[in-house]
Amino acid sequence: MARKKKEKIQQTSIITPLIEVASTTLKTVAPFVTPPPVTNVINAVTTAAQTAVSLNKNKIKKIVSDIAIGAETPQKGVSAMDKRSPIASVSSVLTQKKKKWIDAFNSCGIIISTGDGVAIARGLNNVRSGEVVNILSPGQTKVKMQGLALGLSKKTVSIALFGHNHFVKAGDFVARHFILPQVPTGKKLLGRVIDSLGYAIDGFKPIIKKNWRRIDIKAPGVFTRQSIYEPMLTGVKAVDSMIPVGRGQRELIIGDRQSGKTTIALSAILQQKNVLFQKKNDMIYAIYVSIGQKRSSLAYIVNQLRAARALKYTTIVAATASDAAALQYLAPYTGATLGEFFRDNGYHALVIYDDLSKQAVAYRQMSLLLRRPPSREAYPGDVFYLHSRLLERAAKLKNVLKGGSLTALPIVETQDGDVSTYIPTNVISITDGQIFLDKELFNRGILPAINVGLSVSRVGSTSQVFPMKQMAGRLKLELALFREVEPLLGFLDDLDPITKETLERGLRLIEILKQPRCKPFKIEEQLVLVFAALNGYFDTIRVKKVRLFENFIIALLMKTIYKKLVYNKIIVQSSLDSELLGQFLDEARVYFDLVYDV
């Protein structure tokens, strides 16, 4: 009797801690994701398994198996639930959940080393690649950090941490979360600043988490897409006139550091206030993804959008330079997921990745720490797939699928104008065109510093506003002729009249294509200015006063009856009325000559 009593006490001392911690864990809720699709028993034991780690794993499995087998043998003279000892009651539970309990032991592990944003864990035999895992301190049930299981080997699992590795130490417990990374989506996120995991970081009330979506999913197939034909206006005169972007297109913005790449992207967001069409679903919602930037730069962008009242239709996803490499790696996919909500529901969305060079650097850092073999420039071999599976998610869906679109404007940084390096060549080959920013033009004060000769849109005039399409070819020709004779500017007095006229008009075209930072132009304003430049209305204006005449034309257009007439012709009827524009510009020139000394 004493021996049997001793065995029962020994079994109870091993099983009771598991039951107690499991019952406590059943009351806890996952910190930021929906409950995993498993039973409460698995969820409880997974979180409680730090107790199991301190015990002999094989011994626990044997005890569970022995008790379960013993419970399957009925006792004579005793009913199923009557006069049963505590051990028999536990045995009944274990009999029903035997397989799930043993599987739960394969869903937990222990951290054996940490460093540089990566943790190495032993255990986690059933974890999937790319799955979220929870990290807890021994004896605690509160998750203190999460990570991403990326490197799977026979004995260990490498985890990319979602925070600083100083908060994780060897001996901490790690458990599966049974889901892949996902974030909440919907219009409730408009006007908010969130991180890569869907947490609000703008200091306002917590986000209502609905419409969960996985952040890394397959792009739409060929048969679900249709051709791009709708314009996505940026408000930049040089882009909308010569490098048009369509809804559903992927247009790369590439250039050196501090050359105005972000300015063009922000102008595209601000331009969406000037809705071209008046239909309900034609509004373009914007998602700006900040990757690896300073927090001060991000705060400046947020304040600029808020001051322009553009934040109400914009969501900002931020993974700054001080955040973990894993968050910088996930941020673009989070932005694409937010945009796909609008695309799949028949709306239009614009997502800006600023910039993918820093995402590639973060991915390289993670891959080297995970001991993956390096390739060209020490990047891993799948860095092309990193960007291709992201940018392929931009699409214009067929009308039977509600006809929504997702437009992508990725940004890539070059070094000294060299576009032949690894990441720029990869992204150029993936996208549908590029807007190339020249540092030399920037230093000369030509802003935006777009090199029209190296920039291209492979969708072309198909997605361009028709009146602008009629003038775009002539504008490109005039600028091409100017670039050919531009080296002769120093000999202007010795040139023939035709060459001199080409130079004079080219100088004025360059001035007209300049515009202030983050001040987009409406499409009707752009059309009037381009029409005036191509038809000689600026030819007799001194170069220094071209901007003055330009502002005078826009102010006059907005305050006279011509505003409605021009809008109806250009936007509603989609036609270029040369007679109407000529009449307006003649009057504008007369008033300008009276007010200013030309």
Image (tube, rainbow, N blue to C red):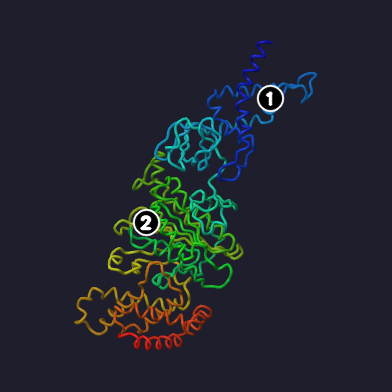
The image's mark for residue 486 is: none
Residue that badge 2 annotates: 425
Towards the viewer: 50 or 416: 50
Q: Position of residue 71 (x, y in %)?
A: 71, 23
What residue does disc 1 label?
91
Q: Secondary structure at mark 1?
A: helix
> What residue type is disc 2 on?
Thr
Of the two numbered discs 2 and 1 in the rendering, the one whose residue sits closer to the viewer? 1
Please provide percent x and percent y for residue 108. Answer: 54, 33
Residue 463: x percent and y percent? Answer: 48, 70
Circle 2: element type: helix
- In this orientation, does residue 377 appear? yes
Q: In this orientation, which residue lies closer to the viewer: 545 or 80?
A: 545
Labels in figure, total: 2
- Image quarter for residue 372? top left
Can residue 223 be seen here? The reply is no
Q: Position of residue 395 (x, y in %)?
A: 52, 61
Q: CA distance from mark 2 to mark 1?
A: 63 Å
Q: In the rendered image, which quarter contains the N terminus?
A: top right
Earlier residue among tags 2 and 1: 1
Residue 33 lies, with reference to residue 45, above or below; the image says: below
Residue in view at x 50 percent, y 38 percent: 144
